Amino acid sequence: MLFVPDSVMEARQKLLADVDSGKLESEQAFRQALELDPDDYVALAALGHIRQKAGDLAEAEELYRRAMRAQPCSFLPYIDLSFVTATQEALASGFAELAIRKFLLDAKAGTELANEHSPVFLLAKKAKGPKGLNPRQKLEWLADQFSQTRDTEPVAVTAELHSLRLIHQLQEREDLDTELVDALVQEGESIVPLLIGVLRGWAQDVLDEDDTHIVENTAALLGEIGDASAVPALLELAGMEDPNVSGPAGWALSRIIDENLDRVSKLFWELAPELDGQGKMTIAQKILQHPKIPPSAEMLARLFENLDRLEEEDREPVFQTLMSAAIMVLGRPGIDFARSMLRRHGDLLSRNFRRECDEMIEEFAGISIPPRPPAEPSSWTVYDICAGEVDWESEEEESEEFPDDDEFIPEPIRRQARPGRNDPCWCGSGRKYKKCHLDSDEAAEDEIPEPPHSDQAQPEGEFDAVRRRVGQFMTDATPKREMNAAIAEMFGDAQMDEMGPLTLLDWMIHDRVFKAFGRPLIEEYLRRNGSSLTGRERAFLESSAESYIDLYEVQDVKEGTGVEVKSLTSGETMFVRDVSTSKVAVRCDGLFARVVDAEDGAGLSGPAVRVPRMHLQTIRDRMEEDRRAAGLPWPKYLKRNWPRIRARNDEIADEWLDTLRLSNGDGEELVESKAYYQIVDRDALLTALRAAPKIHENDGVFVWVTAEEKGTVLGDFRIEGERLVLECNSRERLARGKNMIAQLACAAVTFEQDAFVTQAEMKRNIRENPAPPKSRQSEISAADKRRIEREFVEDYYAKWPDTKIPALGGKTPRQAVKNAAGKRKVAEILKEIENGEARKRKSGEYGYDVGRLRAELGIKG
C-alpha cells in the first residue's frame, strides 16, 4: 500500500505505547509493525539498527535493503547500508554517494546538518575536504570524490547500483530525456518495486507534496513497463482529485491492461472486495473502458462486497456507480444482476435510495442499452509524459467538455438530494459532481436570469453556458422513443462503434429533424429562446444550426493549437482551433468534421472522424455521385445525409478489405503458416541449424533467408521450451521449410502439426479488433531499434523513385512524372506516403521526410 490507513496508524501508536509501558520489547514491537505493513521503512531501519548492535550484520543489511526498496527516495537507508557494507569499499562508497545526493535534494537538509547525532553530520565531519568548506559544501565535495571512483569500481558493484542510480536520476530531474526513459523501461519488472517505492515516498511525505512531476513520471514508466504488480499502487492514485496524479495513473493502468489483460483481470478479481470506494469505482471505470475484459457478473459482484466497511456517506454513491456500470457492461442481463445486488445489499442503503434504485432499474429496462464502447487510446506516449508535455488539468477539462465515449451512459436515474461538490455525481457516471451535473443543476434551479453579456470581446469559453443549456434542452425534450429512433436511423442493425455516442449526440443536436418539432433541435432551441440570448450567443447558435459535417484534408498541424484543413467539397481552406485534434492528426489525413464559428474563430463541434488516406478519394467520388443523383448542392446534401455518408464510409472500408489480396515477394498468397515439432535432441538440432548456409542465428531466432546478400527472409525457426516452431508467410514456403528440416535434422525432431491463419481469418480479426497486434518484445535497445528503422527506411526510399509501381501502370515514379497525368498520380501517392510517415513520427517511430522525394521528382508540396 502507498497510503497508510488510519487503522494501521492507530495500531502503530498502540505498539509504541506498549513499548513505553514495558509491555513489549522494542524488537518485538517493530516486528509486529512489519506484520501490519511490510513496507514500514521506519520499523525496518529500527530493526536493522537493533540487529547491527547485536552483531548480526547479515540480517541488519537485509533489513536496510528492504527499507531502501520500500523508500528508495529517502537518504537514510543508503547511509545505513554504507556503514554496514564498510568492508566492501566500492559498494559502501556507492551507497554513501547516493545517500549524500539524496540528502542534498531534501528540503530538511539544513536541520539534519545542524544535528550532531545525525548520520549525515557524521559523514560531513569525517570528510577531509579543502579548508574553509561548510558542512554542506563538504558533503558536495565528498559526493564528487565518490563519483570519481565509478570508473574503477567492480562490475558486480556497478550492476548492483545501476537501477538505484537510475531511480536517483528520476528523483532529481523534472523532465526526463528519451535516453533516461529508455534506460528505466529496459530494466523491466526488476525495477518495478523501486518505482512503487518512489510512489510510496510521495504518498508518505518522504518527497515533497508538490513533487507531483515525480509521481507523473513514475506512473508513466510503470505503465510502459506493463508489469501487473504495479496495479494496486496505481489504483490508489487513479481516483485522486489532483489530475496531475490521477491522470498519469489512469494512463498507466490502461497501458498495463492493454499489455497484460489476463493478469490484470485476475488482480481485479483478487483486489475487488478489499478496495475502498474510490478503488472499486476505478475498477468499474476500467472495465467499462476496456471491452476486452470479460463481462463477468461474478467479477462485478465482488466489487459490491464489503460495502459495510465504507464510510456511511460513501456507500450509496459507490453502489449507484457500480450498479450503472454493471448494467452497461452486462447489457440486458445486467438488469436482473442490479436487482439481485439491491436485494443483497439493501439493508446498507436508505429507504429513499432503494426506491430511487428501483426506479432507475425499471427505466433502464425500458430503453435500448448501447454496447459499451472502448475508450479512445491515448495519443500520449511515455516520452511525452516524462518530458512534461501533457497538461493533465487541460486534459481533464477537455474530457469534461467533450466527454469520452465510455462516459456515454443513458441517464434514466432519478436525482437524489444534491451531492457535495466533490462527491460522486447522482447520475452514476463515477465523476465528481462538480465536473458532471453541478452546472446544469444550478442552471435549472436558478430563477434569476443571467445579466446580458456585452457584444464586445468576450473571454474564452463564453459560449460554454449556452452549450450546456442546449444539451439540457435535448435531455428534457427527447423522449425515449425519439432517442431509440435516432439510434436506429444512425446505426441501423450495426453495433455502435467507438465514436458512436458523440457522433449521435452531435448529429441529433445539429442536423436530425425531430418529429415533434419539424426541425433540428438547435433550431427549435433558437425558436423558443432566441429573445433571451445575447447577440453573440444567438450568432453562435445560428452558425451552429447552419453547420454540417464536411470532408476535409489536413494541410498542416500546429500541435497544441489546431489544424489547417481544406474542404474537399468546396475547396475552402481554413485554420480550425482544436487542441484534441491537433494532438492526433497529421498532414494529409482525411477527416469528417463539423466546423462552427466558436469563441476565437473556427472550431470543431463534436467528434472528428479520421478517414484512412487510401480511401479518401473513393469516398469523395461516391459522395459526388450520390449528391448529383439527389440533385442537391453540397451544403444541403451534407446537412441531410450524414448517417448515409457515414454508412458509405464503413462500406468502402469493408469493400476494400474484401477485395484486398495479399501476396509475398514470390507471388504466393499471404497465409500465416506454422509447423510445430517436438524436440528430441536439442544439441543435434542446434548444430544442424547453425551449420545450414541459409540460416542465420539472431537473438535466439534462426532466420531462414535466400542465398543472395541481404536476401529475402523466407521464415524463422524458434525454440520455445521443448518445441521447435517454423513460421512462414505462405503455405508454399512452409512446405519448403519442412523439407529443409527433414534433410537437416529429421532425427532431432518429431513433427506434431501445422497451423494456418488464412487471409479470410486475418480480415475477420481486423474487423473484430482494428488495433494492430503488438509485436514480440524486442531485446535490442530503443536507440538501436531507431537506427535500424532509419537505415531500412532511408535505403527503401533512396531506391523508390526508380522502383516500378503497379499504381503507375508498372512505371517508376521518375518515368511517370514526365507527363502531367503521371505527375498528378505520383503527387497523390506521395501524399499517402507522407501521411503514413507522419503517423509513424507521431507514435515515436522514425518517419521519412517525403519532401526529399518531392524535390528529387520535381513535385511541389
Image (tube, rainbow, N blue to C red):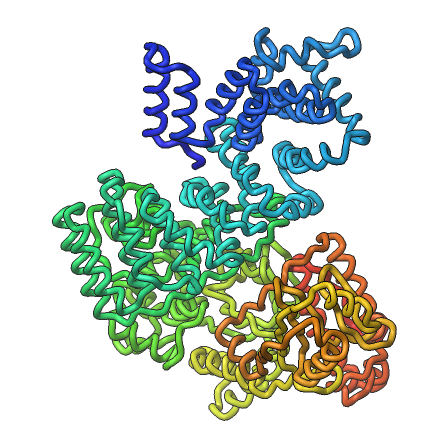
308 or 486, which is in the foreground? 308
User: Which residue in the rendered view is the most extreme toward the left?
Assistant: 351
> Along the horizontal axis of the image, is 632 left or right of 331?
right
In the image, taking residue 569 as reference, residue 157 lies left or right, namely: right
* Residue drawn at the location 65% of the way across and 82% of the way down: 670
Quarter of image, res 232: top left
Q: Kindly indicate the quadrant of the structure image that contains residue 155.
A: top right
Q: Position of residue 264 (x, y in %)?
A: 45, 54
Q: Vertically, is 630 above or below 646?
A: below
Q: Is residue 105 visible?
A: yes
Task: Say which of 135 and 406 sits in front.
Answer: 135
Give the side of residue 684 with respect to residue 419, left or right. Answer: right
Whether residue 831 is visible here, answered yes or no, is no
Which residue corresponds to the image point at 32% horizontal and 19% vertical from the top-left? 14
| Quadrant of the frame with the N terminus | top left
Q: Where residue 705 sits in the image (x, y, percent)?
A: 79, 74
Given residues 817 and 278, the one toward you in this image is: 278
Q: Residue at x 52, y 60 (%)?
A: 377
Q: Residue 745: give x, y in percent of width and height.
A: 73, 74
Q: Say above or below: 87 vs 388.
A: above
Q: Residue at left 79%, top 66%?
A: 690
